[in-house]
Amino acid sequence: MVSAWLLPEHIADVLPAEAARIEALRRSLLDHARCCGFELVIPPLLEHLESLLSGTGRELDLSTFKLVDQLSGRSLGLRGDTTPQAARIDAHLLNREGVTRLCYCGPVLHARPRGLRASREPLQFGAEIFGHAGLEADLETQELALDALRGAGIRRLVIDLADARVLRGVLAGVPLDAMRLQDIVQALSEKDAPALATLAAPAPQAAQRALFALLDLYGGMEVLDAAARTLPDRSLVRQALQDLAWLALHLRAADPELQIGFDLSDMSGYAYYSGPRFALYGGGWSDALVRGGRYDEVGAVFGRNRPAVGFSLDLKALVAAAASAPQAQGAILAPWSEDGQLRAAVRRLREAGEVVVFALPGHEERADQSFDRELIAVAGRWVVQARGLAAVALE
């Protein structure tokens, strides 16, 4: 018999100290996004399945919890990613001309964990730019993502750049069914040369050589020069390499300490992305803390196929990776009393942002709260007494 208090695998409670850090970071990220012109949206956790999954690829389909709506009989899904919902909002509810910037923060659910340490209930923060096809929008989202990691205290930042058009250019004209293409993408992402050899066997020799070349195209700026020499000279490949070079140049100019790398065989989300994509690492954390890129086809199913670029991250993972936790705010202990002056003083302190806790009768001492001050009565007035300091009168 399973104990009633046990939770499913990769599902966990968030206890007070960590919850406070997550909430502080959530507020900080949303405030910064607002200052950059991103408007907050709050999509529902539950939607019709076709809205959540159309055009998103097999990976999201496999990780989406599915159920039947008892009101309509239609298939519903618990969102595993908020980006398709943001695209639906942009296409049908806002339907604006020009550029729209949206951000969001809320839980998503995964039927399968995406890593050994991954939660199946991430708290996803993300930002999207709709309506601009230029690299300027790609750069803006990458810089916002970098700001998010810096704001969380993540150091030694690394950005890995890639582009879905590289593989599309390499395989142009090669007849492949959807399942074989998916397996090739997985073999490239895992750098599995034996599997790639088997899967690429039916392709022409030139395509096979290019696919194997991709396995070694990772590293610094020299990767772009090597790719230009070894990959087919096709317009998609050339444009992808030029765009990656442009992004790297501008990222380096803005932050000379940022480590920039390229991994042209990393095709994570290949069915989803349409152009440049990126992953952010930092603080010695082995898993990507942020993933994003350009996905111009995401709004097609909603009847408005316009340019889109963005990123998302898991706030829980970001807090876990942060190098140091912010100092907890000290609290003020107040004696329980019906005295009106005391209660007025407590209200004023709380309005000023202070944490003030009444010591309930019989529980005057609380070991679970960090009290560095207390309210005491001095000459008929309530004053804040700090440890080792003089009492401060409340006006």
Image (cartoon, rainbow, N blue to C red):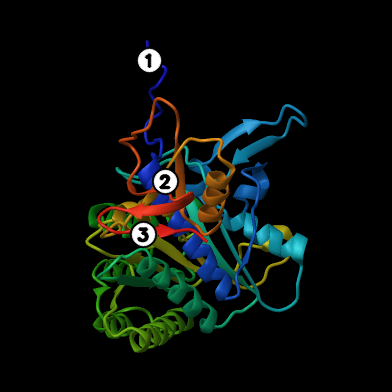
Circle 2 residue: 19
Q: Where does the image place residue 171, in percent across and percent down from the top left?
A: 43, 68
Label 2 with label 3: CB-CB less than 8 Å = no
Taking the image as shown, residue 276 lies to the left or right of residue 115, namely right
Q: Where does the image place residue 144, in percent across and percent down from the top left?
A: 46, 73
Circle 3 residue: 289
Q: How crowded is mark 3: few (under 14 residues within 10 Å), some or many (20 or more)?
A: many
Q: Which amino acid does label 1 sit on?
A: Val
Q: Which residue is drawn at 40% across and 21% down?
A: 5
Circle 1 residue: 2
Q: Please state which of residues 136 and 395 is positioned toward the viewer in this rendering.
A: 395
Label 1 with label 2: CB-CB less than 8 Å = no
Q: Please state which of residues 180 and 153 is positioned toward the viewer in this rendering.
A: 153
- Residue 386 appears in the picture as rendered: yes
Query: Considering only order in the chain, which callout, 3 or 2, is on the residue closer to the N terminus?
Result: 2
**Circle 1 sits in a helix, a strand or a loop, which is it?**
loop
Q: What residue type is labelled 2?
A: Ala
**Circle 3 sits in a helix, a strand or a loop, which is it?**
loop
Taking the image as shown, residue 178 lies to the left or right of residue 221, namely right
**Circle 2 sits in a helix, a strand or a loop, which is it?**
helix
> In front: mark 2 or mark 3?
2
Q: Gap between marks 2 and 3, in whole Å?
A: 18 Å
Q: Gap between marks 1 and 3, in whole Å?
A: 34 Å
Q: Gap between marks 1 and 2, in whole Å?
A: 27 Å
Taking the image as shown, residue 292 lies to the left or right of residue 219, namely right
Query: Considering only order in the chain, which callout, 3 or 1, is on the residue closer to the N terminus?
Result: 1
Q: What residue type is labelled 3?
A: Leu
Query: Considering only order in the chain, which callout, 2 or 1, is on the residue closer to the N terminus?
Result: 1
